[in-house]
């Protein structure tokens, strides 16, 4: 197996890890986010937050890994966009990290004697977590990074079937548009907007799941021009080729 195909397998496995860490974390956080005041009053299991935080820390590692592992391949054709994809992933993970801190703050409050002040702080922290999801792990930044940037690079390089790469190109604008609309709704969108957001996440969900499964079990398409030997040859810097 070539080095590029090993990278493809790692890329796919890391994408699958993002699924097995992010989805359970959302479920573990849900009681505290739905009723933060009651949670800090002692009605919730604080260990669920700690486990959710651990899963999201692993999610951060996997997220950045998906970008870093394909930079050596993508930079052969899209050096700027490859760096842009890494940057988008880091921005996404920054929002996730802020959300983790907010949830751990709720867990800390649950250990205190809950009063009106603690309840207000818990509600605020839960709102911060909601906003980080809107912009980070489930929304706006993902539309740019995983949707538009990665979708475009995959489409142009043909590392995966181009027809499927359209999922990323469609999902990106949908996530950006719905995330922007929710921002202007004050994170209290109408049922219609929530429904649109749910629909907008479907192409992204399918796109990322496809990348995880396809690259893990099949790797990149060998027919992709970017995998040719001549494409792997790095161009010499101008300074190196200039006469002394």
Image: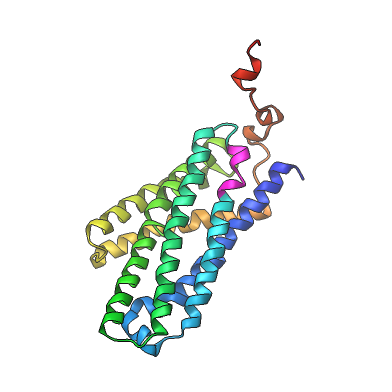
Vertical comparison of 13 with 35: above or below = above
Tell me where residue 200 appears, x and y as whole percent: 37, 57
The magenta region covers 67-74
Viewer-nearest residue: 141 or 36: 36
Asked whether residue 228 is in view, the answer is: yes
Q: Pick out the residue farthest to the right.
A: 1
Quadrant of image for the N terminus: top right
Vertical comparison of 239 with 210: above or below = above
Query: Could you say which quadrant of the image residue 223 lies in?
Result: top right
Left or right: where does residue 12 sit relative to residue 164?
right
Vertical comparison of 95 with 67: above or below = below
Q: Pick out the residue farthest to the top.
A: 243
Query: Could you say which quadrant of the image residue 204 lies in?
Result: bottom left
Left or right: where does residue 208 sit relative to residue 178?
right
Tell me where residue 110 appears, x and y as whole percent: 40, 83
> Magenta region, mostly helix, strand or loop?
helix
What residue do we see at 43% from left, 75% from top? 29
The reply to whether the magenta stretch includes residue 176 is: no
Left or right: where does residue 96 sit relative to residue 20?
left
Query: Could you say which quadrant of the image residue 241 lies in?
Result: top right
Viewer-nearest residue: 180 or 157: 180
What residue do we see at 54% from left, 67% from top? 21
Quadrant of image for the C terminus: top right
What residue do we see at 23% from left, 66% from top? 190
Left or right: where does residue 117 sit relative to residue 158?
left
Count every numbered label the image shows and give the total: 0
The reply to whether the magenta stretch includes residue 70 is: yes
Tell me where residue 242 appears, x and y as whole percent: 63, 13
Asked whether residue 35 is in view, the answer is: no
Tell me where residue 148 appears, x and y as whole percent: 43, 44
């Amino acid at each position: 197996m070539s080095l590029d195909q090993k990278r493809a397998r790692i890329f796919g496995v890391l994408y699958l890890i993002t699924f097995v860490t992010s989805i359970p974390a959302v479920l573990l956080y849900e009681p505290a986010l739905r009723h933060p005041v009651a949670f800090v009053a002692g009605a919730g299991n604080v260990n669920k937050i700690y486990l959710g935080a651990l899963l999201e820390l692993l999610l951060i590692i996997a997220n950045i890994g998906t970008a870093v592992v394909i930079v050596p391949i993508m930079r052969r054709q899209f050096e700027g966009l490859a760096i842009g994809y890494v940057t988008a992933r880091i921005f996404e993970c920054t929002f996730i990290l802020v959300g983790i801190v907010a949830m751990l703050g709720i867990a800390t409050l649950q250990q205190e004697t809950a009063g009106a002040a603690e309840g207000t702080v818990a509600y605020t922290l839960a709102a911060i977590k909601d906003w980080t999801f809107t912009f980070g792990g489930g929304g706006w930044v993902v539309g740019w990074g995983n949707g538009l940037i990665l979708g475009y690079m995959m489409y142009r390089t043909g590392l995966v079937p181009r027809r499927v790469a359209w999922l990323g190109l469609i999902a990106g604008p949908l996530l950006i548009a719905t995330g922007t609309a929710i921002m202007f709704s004050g994170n209290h969108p109408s049922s219609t907007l929530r429904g649109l957001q749910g629909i907008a996440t479907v192409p992204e969900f399918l796109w990322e799941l496809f990348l995880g499964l396809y690259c893990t079990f099949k790797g990149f398409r060998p027919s992709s021009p970017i995998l040719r030997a001549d494409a792997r040859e790095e161009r010499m810097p101008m300074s190196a080729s200039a006469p002394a």
